[in-house]
DNA sequence: ATGGTGGCGCGGCCA
């Protein structure tokens, strides 16, 4: 079973690229972020034409998550328990043998911003929510745009990014508390080339110069860890004309 | 160079 995550930065703009990538990469599940499209305008037909079911939790202009999957999504959740949030950032679903959460973690803007506090509060509320899910589901996958680079090796220039949003000790600790519920970063289960990233700024030729961050993650529960066969980032879509600023991340699981 | 690029939507916000 092939599971992918991709921040598409507007599904309206990127729909043709997403469909082409689905046909080429053929994942069983694709979790998308920053769809920026209200649910009533979501292009379900485009996914259906490729043999995918789709479920969305969107809003106009900002945020928005969606999942396309071969098998029908069930037991859908669109909010963090006890955390009233008008921003559409969460989509939980049971798909075949997996319980899955597609996340668009708040960016945080900068450490002086109210948005940074919102990010940390959001992550703590998410941790509590996921603790409940982890108690109920052995095969649990948490994936999406975390807007946190877990370690310095996930950052093109750690000195330049030290103390900056995406890399602060508080953000990394918040992520670690979630991982400590019993997850592994699937990407790090395997040998990986140095300087492998999932996001590159649109500005300054950052992609061409490989000045990126690895902030798009697939976290798998212990029951999935032993069944994870690969995890890779596909830079192909980032090379296209008018690309998303993120590349897809793909993990493969042997679930019999 | 306090910029740069891109999406949304038409001025300014967000990333």
Image (tube, coloured by chain):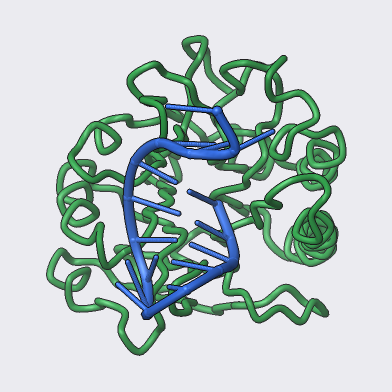
Chain colours: A green, B blue
Q: Nearer the viewer, residue A118 or A228?
A: A118
- The x and y percentages for residue A180 are 83, 41
Q: Residue furthest bottom?
A: A40
Q: Give the side of residue A34 with respect to residue A218, left or right.
A: left
Residue ID at (76%, 82%) = A84
Residue ID at (73%, 32%) = A167
- The x and y percentages for residue A127 are 81, 57
Residue ID at (55%, 49%) = A145
Residue ID at (24%, 54%) = A18
Q: Nearer the viewer, residue A178 or A140?
A: A178
Q: Give the side of residue A50 with respect to residue A189, left or right.
A: left
- The x and y percentages for residue A202 are 39, 37
- The x and y percentages for residue A65 are 48, 67
> Is residue A32 something that shows in the picture?
yes
> Is residue A135 something that shows in the picture?
no
Q: Nearer the viewer, residue A202 or A119?
A: A202
In this rendering, the answer to whether A107 lies above or below B2 is below
In this rendering, the answer to whether A157 lies above or below A164 is above
Q: Give the side of residue A169 with respect to residue A182, left or right.
A: right
Quadrant showing the C terminus of chain A: top left
């Amino acid at each position: 079973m092939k599971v992918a995550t991709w921040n598409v930065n507007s599904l309206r703009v990127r729909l043709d690229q997403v469909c082409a990538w689905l046909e080429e990469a053929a994942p069983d599940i694709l979790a998308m972020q920053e769809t920026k499209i209200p649910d009533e305008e979501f292009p379900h037909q485009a996914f259906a034409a490729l043999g995918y079911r789709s479920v969305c939790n969107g809003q106009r202009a900002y945020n928005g998550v969606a999942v396309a999957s071969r098998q029908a999504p069930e037991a859908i959740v669109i909010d963090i328990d006890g955390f009233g949030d008008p921003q559409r950032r969460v989509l939980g679903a049971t798909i075949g043998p997996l319980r899955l959460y597609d996340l668009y973690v708040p960016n945080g803007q900068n450490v002086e911003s109210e948005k940074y506090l919102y990010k940390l509060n959001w992550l703590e509320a998410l941790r509590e929510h996921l603790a409940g899910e982890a108690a109920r589901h052995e095969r649990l996958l948490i994936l999406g745009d975390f807007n946190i680079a877990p370690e310095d090796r996930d950052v093109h220039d750690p000195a330049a990014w030290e103390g900056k949003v995406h890399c602060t000790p508080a953000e990394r600790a918040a992520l670690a508390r979630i991982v400590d519920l019993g997850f592994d970063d699937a990407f790090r289960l395997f040998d990986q080339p140095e300087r492998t990233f999932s996001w590159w700024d649109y500005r300054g030729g950052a992609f061409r110069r490989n000045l990126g961050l690895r902030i798009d993650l697939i976290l798998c529960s212990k029951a999935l860890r032993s069944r994870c066969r690969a995890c890779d980032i596909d830079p192909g879509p980032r090379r296209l004309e008018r690309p998303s600023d993120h590349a897809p991340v793909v993990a493969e699981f042997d679930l019999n």
